[in-house]
Image (cartoon, helix red, strand yellow):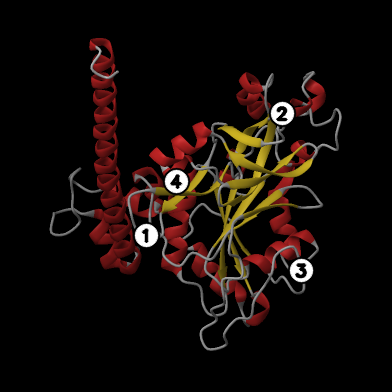
Amino acid sequence: MSKAHERSHLSSYHPGEEQSTSRSLAPDTPGDGRLADLGWSAEIAHAFAPYAGSHHLARVSRVERGGAEVITDEGQIQATYGGDILAAAAADRSWHPAVGDWVALRYWPDGRITIDAILPRHTAMVRDGADRTSHAQVVAANVDVVVIVEHLDPEPDLGRIERLLVLAWASGATPLVVLTKADLVPAPEVLRDDVAAVALGVDVLAVSAPDAEGLDDVRNWLGDNRTMTFVGPSGAGKSTLVNALAGAEVMPTGEVRASDGKGRHTTTHRELIMLPGGGVVIDTPGIRAVGLVANEDAIADAFPDIEELVEQCRFADCAHNTEPDCAVRAAVETGELDAGRLARWYKLGREAAYQARRADVRLRQQERAEWKRREKALRGYYRLRSGKGR
């Protein structure tokens, strides 16, 4: 495994190390340990501690309109959103519960079950909303490994892989590239090397789900009850890969058009699935238009070769056009750096800068709206004091 993979390892929490009288905090007493299997850790227990006296711990397995399906130590249940959750999500869509979130549940005397709080996310895979607004959408939360699934037949789209690598690095999780349909090409290792050339510092695996080739290499990344999310285009074989790892058909699969290798979006929602051998996977719909929500650090992680060249330029503000002693332009001229990769680096940088500007405008709008709300409330308060509001 790569060094990046080693760095992503989360310390595993063993319930026997700490005792608690709260059933929600102790997957081993009583219950069958579902929370431990879901990746429960000492960090999560610490974050949940303020709610332990009045709430139950759960993890979101599926998000639906008006509520979510969650997994507790007793099993799967349906829950609706509490008032604080609805208010937070209305102000910022990124705080809407997402698959993979750890949440605090309240059980009401009348039988209602509400999600009252989302525990802090240690990672979050975020992308632009489908409507191309500046409102970010959390695709998956608390993910340890982002698996970028790309098919070998037809040939991999290197630009798409680079874009998804930026999203993966920005999430805080460790990226892994899995190339599917290795059984359909005569020399999968050649295409694998092409992908490895743009996925620097990232493990690249070639698999064939029908004959289980390479699946053990993927399973190795699920140790210590890690959580994976699978992203990639429709027809890449994400659901087929999940089914192969689960040893059963837990996700529907669809036919792929022979003309272009594209498939239907058989996955229409994000769903958390527990694997029998340990570990959790989150399967996501195929991403048609990937809006970038990233930062300079994530782009630098995805393009370490270009970032290294940038540091060698004579001028710190080099635009890599006509400046003298430009290491980036020299690398393109000598063939050390592919011109297409440089162009994609430029494009991703522009998109990230544009997204940051839009987010800043949205933040200012939210601040103005909040101040207007406060001013209105203050005027109402003074009207009541003066007797005019009675």
Whole-number angstrom distance, CA of label 1 to CA of label 3: 38 Å
* Label annotation for residue 109: 2
In this rendering, would 184 be left or right of 260? Answer: right
Quarter of the image where one finds residue 11: top right
Earlier in the chain: of badge 4 and badge 1, it is 1
Q: Mark 3 points at which residue?
A: 212
Taking depth in this image into account, of 30 and 338 the one nearest to the observer is 30
Q: Which amino acid does label 1 sit on?
A: Asp
Earlier in the chain: of badge 4 and badge 2, it is 2
Residue sitting at x 51%, y 77%: 155
Taking depth in this image into account, of 365 and 265 the one nearest to the observer is 365
In this rendering, would 378 be left or right of 281? Answer: left
Whole-number angstrom distance, CA of label 4 to CA of label 3: 31 Å
Label 1 sits on a secondary structure element that is loop
* Label annotation for residue 170: 4
Whole-number angstrom distance, CA of label 4 to CA of label 1: 21 Å
Earlier in the chain: of badge 4 and badge 3, it is 4
* Mark 3 crowd level (few <14, some 14–19, many ≥20, 10 Å Cα): few
Whole-number angstrom distance, CA of label 1 to CA of label 2: 40 Å
Say if residue 128 shows up in the picture.
yes
Counting from the top left corner in percent of width and height, residue 255 is at 63, 81
Residue sitting at x 44%, y 46%: 170
* Mark 4 crowd level (few <14, some 14–19, many ≥20, 10 Å Cα): many
Taking depth in this image into account, of 370 and 231 the one nearest to the observer is 370
Counting from the top left corner in percent of width and height, residue 321 is at 16, 59
Q: What residue type is labelled 4?
A: Ala
Say if residue 311 shows up in the picture.
no
Whole-number angstrom distance, CA of label 4 to CA of label 2: 42 Å
Q: Are marks 2 and 3 in contact (CB under 8 Å)?
A: no
